[in-house]
Amino acid sequence: MKLKIVYGLVISLLLSTQALAGLDSKINQMLHNGQGVAMYNSQETGVAIISIGQGLNPRGNIAIDMAKQEATKNLLAFLKGERISATEQAMTAYSGDDVVESYYSKMRTDVNGAIKSAYMYKSGQYDGYQYAAVIVSERSKNISQAFADRKSNPMITARGFASMRNGIGKARTLALEQALRNAVEQYGGVSMASKTSIENGDKYRSKLSAVAKGVVKQYKVTKEQKEGRDYMVEIAAEVVEELEGGMQSIDAIKENLGRPSFFLAVKDERLYKILRKILVNNDFEVTNVERMAKYFVIASVDKLEMPMPAMPDMMGLRTTITVNVKDKHNRQDILMVENDPTDTIEVSANKSIRERKSYGLAMELIEQDFTKAINQHFSKSFQEGQKVLVALDGFDRMRDVDELRECIESLPLTKSVSAGTVDSRSVIYEVIYLGNPNDLQLDIMKKSREFRLRGLRAKNTNSGIITFKF
């Protein structure tokens, strides 16, 4: 109880009117001076570091997220350092009596690390850009140390911001979602990796990825209001490392992954209905359109009819059900389960009753493993990214292979790209992607305009591989 009182006192001090006025004034000064990171000191906050990031995107909410991530990256670089490498090359050649000169330069910066207790304080518009201010203070560090054992008091105060361009209702929903994400980042810290490269002063590529671990168990909205063209929601959230039983908040994870759907490639009608019911009851999306699915459920049933000598009018049935789930985007199995048939024997004179009960016993044995494996796969995909295969067919120059790889690498949610061997003017890339794979094809097509990929077109296939050609 004492810890909670101390926590509430510190937060109230940090967010007092006097502290707000001083912080706002400092942030406005930083924006005016084009300053990204600055020290700040007051009686209420103690020594604090303010980091400002900027984002520019036609979609206001994406711009807010970009600005917030850049602010966190700048804060991490300030606290833990930034690695910089540079390459320069100059060459002189003669073409007849004329001198031909070329110059090449490349600079690359890397930031890797993790940071805790970073508080997103403010977001707004300045000089045509969306900005976000992230703060870590002496007081928040003290709080972090005092609550080393978060189980004794897992309450977190966090803010979220969203653009009101599409109405207050949608802005409030998105701001609340961001506040929940920010609460998780403040609780467990955010691990961040950033790579930026500049070639010849104008070709700029930047990639940023962030991963946070934790689950919001419950929360309460403590404040919400309009702030300029944005909407702000502040929450008090109880954050834990995992929910009871070891499961993460799978609903939030599924939303982040685009609510991936399942297609049932099952010939046995009774088994089809059982599997569909299990998926629906566990809130997994099921589609009847094969091309819309991310996962294919392939299931088979092996039935063994057994006469019962002691009961001439009766027959026994032993059932073995095998369920295999494949990922369409990388052709890999994500799970395979099979029941022990010895516990599925059902005796009845009625064939339909035998099947219904024996099938039910078989599925009871594997249902928990089946749904648990899917949830674990979702959690792993959310934390580590999903493997997606991308193909380029019919290219004429190896430069095209490199350009498409760089194009995919430049996408903000791409974690890594590796190209396979070239075979008959065709190559397959293995992409680890942190977002929804169903959006990847369109994202690549939009981004390709910034690279030397004129004439690139998407090619429709039923293989699950995202394929492009010229």
Image (spheres, helix red, strand yellow):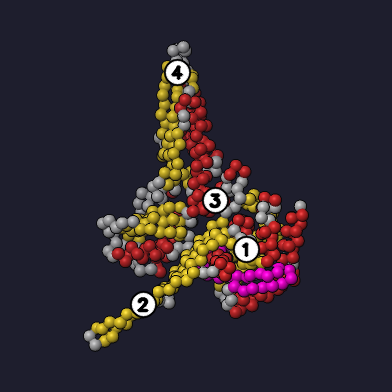
The kind of residue tagged 1 is Ala
Mark 2: secondary structure: strand
Does the residue at mark 2 contact the one at mark 3 (Cβ under 8 Å)? Answer: no
The one of 172 and 92 positioned closer to us in this rendering: 92
Q: Categorize mark 4 by other alpha carbons within 10 Å: few (<14), some (14-19), many (20+).
A: some
Residues in magenta? 37-65
The kind of residue tagged 4 is Met
Q: CA distance from mark 1 to mark 2?
A: 41 Å
The numbered mark, 2 or 4, whose residue comes first in the sequence reads 2
The circle on residue 141 is: none
Q: CA distance from mark 2 to mark 4?
A: 83 Å
The circle on residue 315 is: 4
In this rendering, position of residue 264 left or right of residue 139: left
User: Within the image, what quadrant is residue 66 found in?
Assistant: bottom right
- 463 part of magenta stretch: no
The numbered mark, 4 or 3, whose residue comes first in the sequence reads 3
- 39 part of magenta stretch: yes
Q: Residue furthest bottom?
A: 97
The circle on residue 89 is: 2
Mark 3: secondary structure: helix
Which residue bears the numbered disc 1?
118
The kind of residue tagged 3 is Ile
Identified at 27% across, 64% down, the residue is 396
Q: CA distance from mark 4 to mark 3?
A: 46 Å
Q: CA distance from mark 1 to mark 3?
A: 22 Å
